[in-house]
Amino acid sequence: MNTISGHCLCGAVAFSYEGAPNWTLHCHCESCRRATSSPMATWISVPRSAFRFTAGKPAYFASSPGVRRGFCARCGSPLTYENERVPDEIHLLAGALSDPQRIRATAHVFAGEQLSWFDTADDLPRYETTRRNAQPIRHGPRK
């Protein structure tokens, strides 16, 4: 079985998961930008049953109703996103992986909230908000 691991900046909180992720997406929503202090966040969704903390436990912040974001209480590194609407999944920030080169995003979501001064050079589909029942607004960077 393929084991993927990760940890916070100081190493106090570490995790691993088995198998392939459900999806990997770049998110441009304001909430994710603020939670990560970056122009976008790259999230990996994994089955909760395949995930475990291997060192320490995160602290949590309830960022909106039904949503909590996990972070290291020692160094402040953001690590997880959990939503009551998808209780069988946990979302992990790709930058926390021990080897983030191993994953590949398949789309950008909330491109309608993308910062005007930021873009990426990939040709992935961009969705106005979520991908649920939606068509991309474009593929690739803004022209």
Image (cartoon, rainbow, N blue to C red):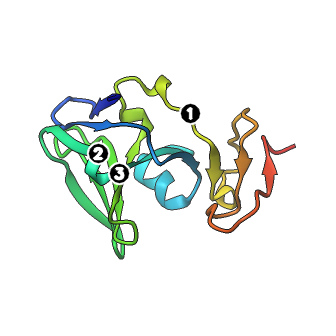
- Cα–Cα gap, marks 2 and 3: 5 Å
Q: Secondary structure at mark 1?
A: loop
The residue under the point 36% across, 31% down is 97
Mark 3 is on which residue type? Pro
Q: Which mark is residue 50?
A: 2
Image spot of residue 120 (x, y percent): 69, 36
Mark 2 is on which residue type? Ala
The residue under the point 33% across, 50% down is 80
Q: Residue furthest bottom?
A: 65
Please name the residue that numbered disc 1 is placed on: 104
Callout 2–callout 3 Cβ contact below 8 Å: yes
- Label 2 Cα crowd, 10 Å radius (few <14 / some 14-19 / many 20+): some
State which quadrant residue 54 falls in.
Answer: top left
Q: Which mark is residue 47?
A: 3
Q: Residue furthest left?
A: 56
Query: Which of marks 1 and 3 precedes in the sequence?
Result: 3
